Image (cartoon, coloured by chain):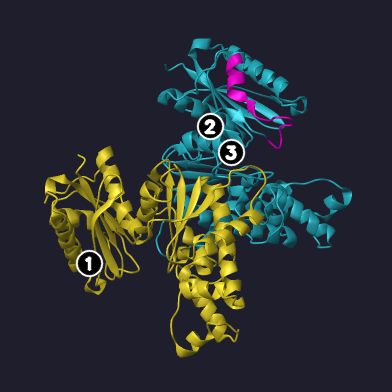
Chain colours: A cyan, B yellow
């Protein structure tokens, strides 16, 4: 079995990644292509199945050496039933039986989970959490996704939607979130929202070295905000600091919720590295309790854009080892 | 084995409860006595061991029909090592090896856990959560304790101190908590703090039908506040409503953290029944997201003061069934 592989698929609204991953978490062959999700689910699934076949063929691995496919998808979804209920970035995906569809097209056993969960599992299995048993990952992108690993298991909960920490309310009666709540963590601390708030403040008349971009209508993201912070821009520094403060509150609440060994930060904002973690750590130490020294470590993710496919494949390996593939459909 | 029993012990700062519980969660014999914790750990443990013996003898059950002892204690503590690290209400308890001490004194295998955890496990096993797999309980007393049951298991986390939800920060830069943090849930929503805030506001000059008690220096608690709410007192109603609002925020954050089927409210404040749950539910519905209908039910606990001993005994039954008693010491 040393030459066996699992296939990891990371289904995103813009890009789909497919990778052949060995049992140690190493990628042996990988492909990425445009999702074209505007076509609706069937062609997207056809493409995924075709690319799975192509990656296997390109790697020259016989089919019988493939243990199965793990798929990370936006949700809400049901991992146990293999169904995507709906997804903001996947038009017309309503209760799509994704694992069954992939099995029918590829002949390979399939398992799926929330994309943020599988990215967290990837870092846990083969990245920034490989030496711990309990880990929480926050993926700081357009929104904030999260995955919770407890004693090596992903936490799902009764409705299979646990760990939606981007929608923890951190500011009572705070700013409106697209989810319908107010004061969600992701409104204050996602990469997308930090950049948006800098742009809003510039439009409201605050001076900033990013004013020129706003005047020219050039969109910018967390990367430009971090650069402005490093260049000493007061507006960018204030809103970056505020984001790190709310992330530190989230870390305190993660500590008390799950008591993990480690909290890992991933996604666009995490590319700031120390500029992110040192500030979050500083706020965390000012906020934290003194009853017990059960403080988690705060670290940056290490797998980058590969976390999703590695975690998806790792979850497939785990299904193989534990014999818990979903029941196979009658094709 | 139909006539076997587990002993549940609930060690509190004021009262210790000891009960003989069958495998269905029914109490067959019970005792409660004053803790006298001012004497330090040794005499308190001696008393516990003696009362365990007396309850067994009084019930007329032979020793060989006792599977073991489950003990709920204030923490922080280590369930896996059987050690109470320290406890606010237990003077001089510093790293006390409680399960070993009880085993040495009684000859019975012992297991222990956080008191709020075992009260939650009691409701899960034999009370308000007996028909579900995933449940979170908030115990609204002097502070707020919590226990998290996931697929029938108590959540502990790496440092064995998970589920300290009374110390979730719900108000950034809010009121100071005794734990060293600011804005903790329990500062706004525990029974003790709601009563304290009513008294403070009266001293600050706000009118209330409870003013007479404050003037006479008569202490009061959540019961009197609830009565004042039912009598239409504006001050009590405002602070009660605020407590329920913050509990509803906690329920939203519990939903996203653990996705449980049910959230159970216990402790002094829960005696308000519908006066509590209907208001928490109202706020919850106003606060909650609309992305997915993964809403937990919010219910009142049903076991009252027995939840702790029933849960402690239930945890002992589980240890017996799963063969995971702590290693027995060389006596």
Structural crowding at the residue carrying mark 1, measured as other residues with C-alpha within 10 Å and reported as few (<14), some (14–19) or many (≥20): some
Q: Nearer the viewer, mark 1 or mark 3?
A: 1
Residue B173 appears in the rendering: no
- Residue, disc 2: A311
Q: Chain of mark 3?
A: A
Q: Chain of mark 1?
A: B
Question: On the image, numbered disc 1 is attached to which residue?
Answer: B41
Check the image and report above or below for A67 versus A301.
above
Q: CB atoms at circles 2 and 1 under 8 Å apart?
A: no
Which residue in the rendered view is the most extreme toward the front? B231
Which residue is painted at 45% across and 37% down in the image?
Answer: A153
Quarter of the picture containing the C terminus of chain A is: top right
Q: Residue at x 58, y 23 (%)?
A: A99
Of tags 2 and 3, which is closer to the observer?
3
Labels 2 and 1 within one chain: no
Residue that mark 3 sits on: A116
Q: Is residue A313 left or right of residue B77?
A: right
> In percent of the image, x 67 and y 21: which residue is there?
A45
The magenta span reads A87-104
Query: Does residue A297 lie above or below A283 as drawn?
Result: above
**Residue A38's image quarter?**
top right
Give SS at disc 3: helix
Can you see residue A35?
yes
- Which type of secondary structure does the marked residue at label 2 adopt? helix
Mark 2 crowdedness (10 Å alpha carbons): few <14, some 14-19, many ≥20 = many
Q: Which is nearer the eye, B272 or B82?
A: B272
Give the CA distance from mark 1 to mark 3.
Answer: 47 Å
Q: Say whether disc 2 or disc 3 marks the residue closer to the N-terminus.
A: 3
């Amino acid at each position: 079995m040393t030459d066996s592989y699992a296939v990891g698929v990371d289904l995103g609204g813009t890009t789909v990644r497919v990778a052949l991953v060995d049992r140690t978490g190493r990628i042996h062959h990988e492909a990425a292509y445009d999702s074209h999700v505007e076509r609706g689910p069937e062609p997207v699934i056809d493409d995924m199945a075709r690319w799975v076949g192509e990656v296997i063929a390109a790697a020259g691995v016989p089919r019988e050496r493939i243990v199965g496919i793990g798929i990370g998808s936006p949700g809400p979804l049901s991992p146990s039933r293999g169904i995507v209920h709906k997804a903001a970035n996947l038009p017309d995906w309503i209760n799509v039986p994704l694992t069954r569809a992939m099995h029918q097209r590829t002949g390979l056993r399939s398992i799926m989970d929330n994309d943020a969960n599988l990215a967290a599992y990837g870092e846990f299995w083969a990245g920034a959490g490989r030496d711990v048993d309990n880990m929480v990952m926050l993926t700081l992108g357009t929104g904030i996704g999260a995955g919770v690993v407890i004693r090596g298991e992903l936490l799902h909960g009764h409705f299979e939607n646990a760990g939606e920490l981007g929608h923890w309310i951190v500011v009572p009666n705070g700013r409106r979130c697209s989810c319908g709540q107010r004061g969600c963590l992701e409104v204050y601390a996602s990469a997308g929202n930090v950049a948006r708030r800098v742009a809003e403040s510039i439009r409201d008349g605050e001076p900033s070295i990013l004013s020129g971009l706003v005047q020219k209508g050039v969109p910018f993201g967390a990367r430009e905000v971090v650069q402005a912070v490093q260049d000493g821009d007061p507006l960018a520094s204030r809103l970056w600091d505020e984001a790190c403060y709310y992330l530190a509150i989230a870390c305190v609440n993660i500590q008390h919720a799950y008591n993990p060994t480690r909290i890992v930060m991933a996604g666009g904002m995490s590319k700031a590295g120390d500029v992110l973690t040192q500030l979050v750590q500083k706020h965390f130490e000012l906020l934290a309790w003194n009853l017990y020294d059960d403080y988690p470590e705060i670290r940056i993710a290490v797998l980058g854009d590969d976390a999703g496919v590695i975690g998806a494949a790792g979850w497939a390996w785990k299904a193989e080892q534990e014999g818990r593939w979903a029941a196979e459909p009658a094709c």
